Image (cartoon, rainbow, N blue to C red):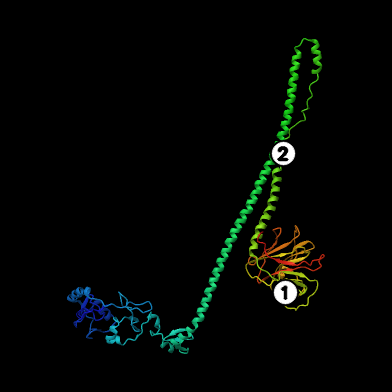
Amino acid sequence: MASANTSWSENFSCSICLDVFNSPVSTPCGHNFCRACITTFWDDQVQYKCPVCNELFHTRPDLRVNTLLSEMAAQIKPSVRVKEQPCVEPAEVPCDVCTETQLKAVKSCLVCLISYCHIHLEPHQRVAGLKKHLLVEPMDRLEDRMCKKHDRLLELFCQTDQVCVCQFCTDGDHRSHPVVPLKEEYEVKTAQLGKIESEVQQMIQERKRKIKEINDTVDRSQADADRQIADGEKVLTALISLIEKWQDDFNQTVKEKLKSTEKQAEGLIKELEQEIEDLTNRSSEVKQLTHTEDHLHFLQTFRSLKNPPHTRDWTTVKVRPPSYIGSLRRSLDQLEETLNMERKKLCDDAELKTVQQYEVDVTLDPDTAHHNLILSKDGKQVHDGGGRKNIPDNRKRFKSKIFVLARQSFSSGRFYFEVQVKNKTAWRLGVARESVNRRADLIVSPEKGFWTVRLTKDQLVFIDIPDLSIPLRAELQKVGVFVDYEAGVVSFYDVEARVHIYSATGCTFREPLYPFLSPGNYNYEGSNSTPLIISPVDQTE
């Protein structure tokens, strides 16, 4: 890959590789070559001839090492100054023959399928057989540019099969197919690259958005998990405190029973000890009297001693031990009732705080409102006006029921909103799917696309077939509605009491859901003109 800078060094250069001899050998005609160069050259030839003088040999010559030339070449090789050659740049085609510093190719041979630098190209410019090879501008990966079937350059493009073909292919498998030069198809495809790039970028952005969506879901899940853990600790701590208080109260009750028994026994023992003391004193007096000889004193004293001192009849007196039978069970029953009430209260409160995180802004859609309904300008309130309004009809409007839907719809995820129902005697609210029948006197049930609760005649029910009655603890003032679309859950909450009212589970949602309200008739059970009000969530709870 190098050329000597002195004329005398050319005598020690191989005329094939143009480099200083490496294991030089001599041919019968007297010319010298590197053993590897002449061997490779003859391997590709049918006849054996000298690359320099073209002398033809009938048999492959037996090559012998040129000892003198080998020694001279070994001595001058280190002293030969190699001419600096430019290294190949990233965008350029490298020489396939260079073994050390790789030079830039100046031509590619479509016969050899090799790219050559200006040094290794020399045989193609000098040797008669190599001069016939087709040389083109440098090409990378030449083997990919050749037709595998005909071993010819791929110069055409088949528009039917959308593949590159050679000239011979047009006479065979692609005879009846329209073909064009590669350049022409290149210009067509280049014009399409802009659209492809735009589509690829759009796909990239969609996937980036999906990654963000997934990461946001993970973040929300982490936040929900942290909140659940905190709520769980709060609930368990409160329940543990209740159990500890119950234990203290139970122990105190047992101790008080024992203390009462001990106090009773102590009083009786004290009374018995007093009687014993009195009887002991009487016994001493009797003994003293038995030893007196004073008849007068004996008779006078005997009168007071003959009657025993006043004492209780102890035959029926007993200290009854306190009974603890059933005490633990009754106490545990009370504890269980208290724990259940407190657990539900704490869990409902924690659950409500969690679902309130999914609050959405809801406004009512006047195009869906029944003719009798009156909506506020901000779309947050609705009540029955007591008569039909003169407004245009449309396919979205409820015709037979005094219903109204929100503008907003939800097809995935979770959402929550609150409605004030204070001072009303009848109402209905929840969610409805987009395709519900709005024209006929429809049945309101999950089967028909409605998931709602209704207050009527002081009864709260979840509307279904049949209706499900829900215990009403106190007058409702504000109701929260929560939906988990994927989980198929619709839940209702008493916001002021912070308790769970009811959850419809196992629901199947296949289309958008809309918040749904019905304020009830104007004069139901007396005046029912108070509006339903969509209220913002109070974050201070």
What x and y, as percent, mark residue 110?
35, 84
Viewer-nearest of discs 1 and 2? 1
Q: Is residue 77 left or right of residue 308?
A: left
Instruction: Identify the element where label 1 is drawn.
Output: helix
Where is 396 relative to 53, above or below? above
Of callouts 1 and 2, the N-terminal one: 2
- Marks 1 & 2, CB-CB < 8 Å contact: no
**Disc 2 target residue:** 323
What x and y, as percent, mark residue 514?
68, 70
Examine the rendering and report whether any part of residue 257 can be seen: yes
Where residue 59 sits, quadrant-wise, is bottom left
**Disc 1 target residue:** 366
Where is 174 relative to 90, above or below? below
The amino acid beneath tag 2 is Ser
Where is 532 relative to 328, above or below? below
The amino acid beneath tag 1 is Pro
What x and y, as percent, mark residue 539?
65, 61
